[in-house]
Amino acid sequence: MLHYYGYLIFVHENCPRNFDSASVLESLEKSLFFGMMFLLIPGQILTGVLLYDLYRTMPIIEKLGGLRVIDGLHLTCAYLMMSALVIHTYLHTLKKYGGKPRF
């Protein structure tokens, strides 16, 4: 799928995936959603909880590297989730129209 989205789509080739009823998502989408559900969203929640009340959580924050590290992780998770939303929408639109430009 990376070869398709990286090259074949720009030379107007059809998607090589065969749709079957057992698998709704392709492997690239599965890995994206897996990463979001098990890495980004828990990371966003945990860092958000730590940043919510700095007076109570400052000892934990200091053990994890300081306020800048936790804040950086929180922002990185947010940016990655927003970029995944944009990329997913773009790729879904390409897949919907078969990767061929509609002029």
Image (cartoon, helix red, strand yellow):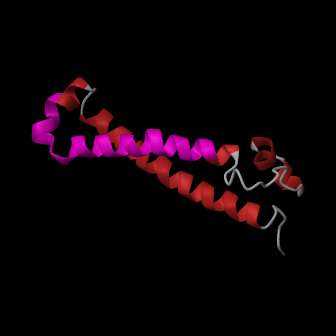
Q: In which quarter of the image is the N terminus?
A: top right
Q: Name the side, left or right, on which 99 lies relative to 88.
A: right
* Residue 79: x %, y % from top left: 46, 49
Q: What residue lies at 81% left-to-right and 50% top-to-bottom?
A: 17
* Residue 12: x %, y % from top left: 89, 58
Which residue ends up furthest to the top in the rendered image?
Answer: 63
| 36 magenta-colored | yes
Q: Quadrant of the C terminus?
A: bottom right
Residue 21 vs residue 80, the one in the foreground:
21
Q: What residue lies at 24% left-to-right and 44% top-to-bottom?
A: 49
Q: Name the side, left or right, on which 101 lies relative to 49.
A: right
Residue 84 vs residue 36, the one in the foreground:
36
Q: Magenta stretch? A: 30-59
Q: What residue lies at 37% left-to-right and 38% top-to-bottom?
A: 73
| 89 magenta-colored | no
Which residue ends up furthest to the left in the rendered image?
Answer: 55
Residue 92 vs residue 79, the one in the foreground:
92
Q: What residue lies at 22% left-to-right and 31% top-to-bottom?
A: 61
* Residue 39: x %, y % from top left: 45, 38
* Residue 55: x %, y % from top left: 10, 40
Q: Which quadrant of the figure has residue 62?
A: top left
Which residue ends up furthest to the front in the rendered image?
Answer: 22
Q: How many marks?
A: 0
* Dominant secondary structure (helix, strand or loop) of the stretch shown in magenta: helix
